[in-house]
Image: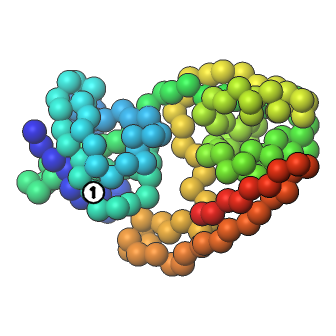
Amino acid sequence: MPVFTQRLDAEQLNDDQLQQLKVQQEAGNYLSLDFDTRQRSRFKADTQSGITIGVDLPRTETLKSGCVLADTSGNLMQILAADQALTRVSTQGDDFALMKAAYHLGNRHVPLMITRSALFFEPDHVLSDMLVRLGVHVKDVNAPFEPETGAYQSGHAQGGHSHGSHSHSHSHSHDDHSHSHSH
């Protein structure tokens, strides 16, 4: 089983490597992974063509759709975001209601994909009910999930090192109970 241990910067791939990825994609030799798997640095998976491979990366940020991995022999493997169950949040032109929905989901630390016309998150009926009460439309869909990474996450293109860290805790008081969050 080939094991891919290095993440490559897609912008630095040469023409031969890009051609290799194109041929592989046509043959189904790529990984289509859901968001939960793309957050892990170590896993085993099957390519679309049924070849089992291993991924053993140093601790890294979430693998984005289009990321390219390499093994010690120089073989490449492209990662694509798989369609998965999501909840789509939209309005009929009410930007303020969509902003309120984004605020309330963010306040609950929900991984959120933001597009120009909709928000997407992994299904949660409690959150869906809350959003309906806020006056927005919710709909179950299947789509690739690429949530926002956050303003404090370092970019891979920055040389692979961190440009800062963010840590804090805070408490919320809600009527008759209180709890705290740490991240």
Viewer-closest of 22 and 174:
174
Give the image location of residue 158, x and y in percent.
44, 73
**Horizontal and vertical percent position of residue 90:** 79, 31
- In terms of depth relative to the viewer, which is nearer, 38 or 80? 38
Asked whether the viewer can see residue 97, the reply is yes
Residue drawn at (38%, 35%), measured in percent from left and top? 33
Which residue does the numbered mark 1 point to in the structure image?
A: 57
On the rendered structure, is 100 left or right of 146? right
In the visual, does 76 lie left or right of 59? left
Q: In this view, does 19 lie above or below 171?
A: above
Where residue 169 sits, quadrant-wise, is bottom right
Using residue 54 as the reference point, say whether residue 1 is left or right of it: left
Q: Which residue is more in the foreground, 33 or 37? A: 37
Q: Residue at x 74, y 45 (%)?
A: 105
**Location of residue 125 by image quarter:** top right
Residue type indicated by callout 1: Leu
Instruction: Reply above or below: 183 against 34.
Output: below
User: For this rendering, which residue is in front, 48 or 11?
Assistant: 48
Residue 72 rendering spot, x and y as whole percentages = 11, 57
Check the image and tell me how it is coloured.
rainbow
- Identify the secondary structure beneath mark 1: loop
Instruction: Tell me which residue sits at (35%, 56%) in the image.
Output: 10
Question: At 60% from the left edge and 51% from the top edge, which residue is drawn?
Answer: 148
In the image as oriented, which residue stretches furthest toward the bottom?
163
Which image quarter is the N terminus in? top left
Picture quadrant where residue 161 is located: bottom left
Compared across the picture, whether 142 is left or right of 136 comes to left
Q: In this view, does 102 lie above or below 94?
A: below
Is disc 1 surrounded by few (<14), some (14 to 19) or many (20+) residues within 10 Å? some
In the picture, which quadrant includes the C terminus? Answer: bottom right
**Residue 117: horizontal and vertical position, in percent?**
76, 37
Do we see residue 13 in this rendering?
no
